[in-house]
Amino acid sequence: MLKEDNRKLMLEKAIKEHQYQTSALLEILHKAQELYGYLNREILSFVAASLKLPPSHVYGVAAFYNYFRLKQPGEHVVTTCMGTACYVKGAEEIISAVEKEFNVKRGDSTADGRLSIFTTRCIGACAMAPSIVIDDEVVGKATKEIVIKKIKLLLEGKKAETS
Amino acid sequence: MLLKKLNFYWRVKKLKPADIIHLAETELDAQRSYKYRINVCCSSGCIPFGALKVLKAFEDAVKEFGVQKECKVARTGCIGTCSVGPAVMVEPGDYLYQSVTPEKAREIVRDHVVLGLPVKDMLYGNKAYFEKQHRLVMKNAGKIDPYRIEDYIAAGGYSALVKCLLRMSPKEVIDEVWLSGLRGRGGAGFKTGQKWTFVARAHRSPKFIVANLDEGDPGVFANRTLAEADPHAIIEGMLIAAYATEANKGYIYIRAEYPLAVETLKRALDKARAMNLVGQNILETNFSFDIELRLGAGAFVAGEETAILASVEGNRANPRPRPPYPAASGLWKSPTLIDNVETLANVPQIISHGGLWFSKIGSPTCTGTKCFSLTGKVKNPGLIEVPMGITLREVIFDIGGGPPDNKKFKAVLVGGPSGGCLPDTMLDLPIDYESLTKAGAIMGSGGIVVIDEDSCMVDTAKFFIDFCVDESCGKCTPCRVGLHKIQETYARIMDGEGKPEDIDFLRSISGYIQDASLCGLGQTAPNPVLSTLRYFGKEYTEHILDKKCAAGKCSFKHKVKEDEF
């Protein structure tokens, strides 16, 4: 069962705003991910029950789209753009270096749950390739040194202000 | 006073057609009262470079020097020079400043606005970048504030809609689009007039319109930039399409990865609705049409026309066999028109200036212009709009400036992951649907990625195959299994275990996938394989026979992952 809290109330409100239409499933999953940060079993079952859809359908949709996260992300999230422009300009080297430095695989979190590393297809900042998103900040024309330095600062609890 | 007048129209009155013209005049008067206008590019390309701080600095500086009455600071969409952001344009005279910082902003206001002397050493010097471009769809980009509908109306916006509502029948609108020769900008290049006719002829209600803004191709950001810079052009295009095809409801399907574009479109829709331009009885006529946003969630296949329908309905984005085509049976089995947003944004201008005017731009078989995101190894990456029929050489070397650091040009990838890699011998190829397809590439949604001698073509082709394997929805076997076989073969070649017969195998299986796949993803996915084999076959032989990679990318140490299948 989903815990009774504000987030659940807001999710219920969003579902109501969409008039319980099954066609708004994607919108509702977006809202749920915005509120909870990821989509776990409880959230998906709750959405399924509210929209009177089979849970398998809701899980199927959530699992199909890359944007929805089914695992809880770490405290800090580093997302590397792996679009064509970034790849051509060396995004692969950056992410390999980050993986090695912090001992974490892409798509996963560190053992202490403080850092997650993801890759995404294209964030559309191709003119400044390679681009890396560290939490909410987009770092353009990134190099592995800058990125590793920024992540270290972040993990030490300082706001990364250097560019 | 003027502001009050504008507010009056905005809140109280339900607009009528004549009010649009009146509003445009009022707004133009307001704009003319300023001697200077500073346009600060605040699109996704410039914001990470600090464009919002620059905007604030300009506003502060204008106050500091007390020139608020002479100088207007506007937040605009993309100016086009994404590599030297934040970009700032000062009108009149179109002075373009590059890499502006908050300190420099103050300097620009002091010298340019107060003293009237442009700051020469900060001006963008590369004239060639703009010379060969033809801005049609993006004509308002970087000039108007996308958050203000008044700016769009002052630039002639919504006058085409008024013209349709008052003076044209739906059939006349379609005829005009036919005459213009406009073709779908989403990649396939289907005649827009023909598509509209199909939907108009389907005498069933309700009818839907889906505007496709699911720019899934990595390395492409033309549609996003359009939505961020000129959202009302998309909305007006949709309204005209709805009027012509007698549709009732529209959806704009946009990627959730584009938060700024989503926000801009949301605001634009709210304003248009408040002004009686979207919704019931538009401009007090009998025409009603409502538009809703639908967020995609990162599935490349959702750009395919039947998959997008499944996604709008809230399902997995699986394509389905055609016929029935969406024009006959689309959203919830109703007739549905699916157009790319760039196609729709062309429509208002076709109606305003006439189809004949439009048909004279570009090449005879491919009229109009096309927006491209020019990225990869070029000196001036950015968003460009060029007339159809321009050659690749002009785009890459004249506009883009060629590869930086005196590196040698190796290939250009046109059309995203399902496009093709073309070598330097194909540089004089004109950009239009037929020539590109003949050469083994596709127009796609408009991505040009330049590759220099540092990249290995085998590795590049594998990158695209990896992408398509990930993005394949898994519904049909040729795409799901076939692409996987290609991926394995590549892994083996790059592992140093390639066999001479691999080349023939790649060629034949690519053919099968192209012929037997259900949707556009599978049909075009082998393009990078076939085009690299065709133009860069030597690199494959080097990899297989000599275990050598000229670019030094392949380590020949990779292990094939058996468990992935």
Image: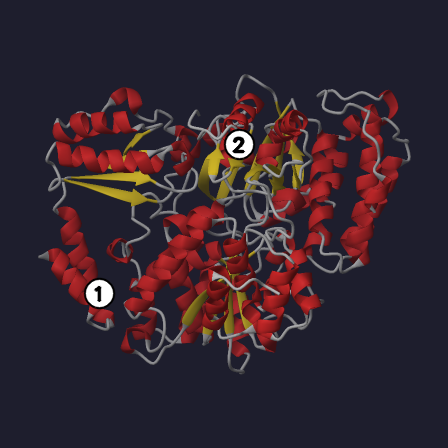
Q: Residue furthest top?
A: B406
x, y percent for residue B459: 73, 31
What chain letter is assigned to the residue under label 2?
Answer: A
* Above-or-below relation of B525 to B404: below
> Element under label 1?
helix
x, y percent for residue A91: 61, 30
| Disc assigned to residue A52 | none
Amino acid of disc 1: Trp
Amino acid of disc 2: Ala
* Above-or-below relation of A5 to B395: below
- Left or right: where A118 falls relative to B64: right
Does residue B24 appear in the picture of this structure? yes
x, y percent for residue A5: 49, 62
Viewer-closest of B486 and B425? B486
| Disc assigned to residue B10 | 1
- Left or right: where B504 falls relative to B553: right
Viewer-closest of B125 and B397? B125
The residue labelled by disc 2 is A129
- Left or right: where B421 falls relative to A136: right
User: How far apart are the alpha carbons under marks 2 and 1?
Assistant: 42 Å
> Element under label 2?
loop
* Above-or-below relation of B271 to A130: below
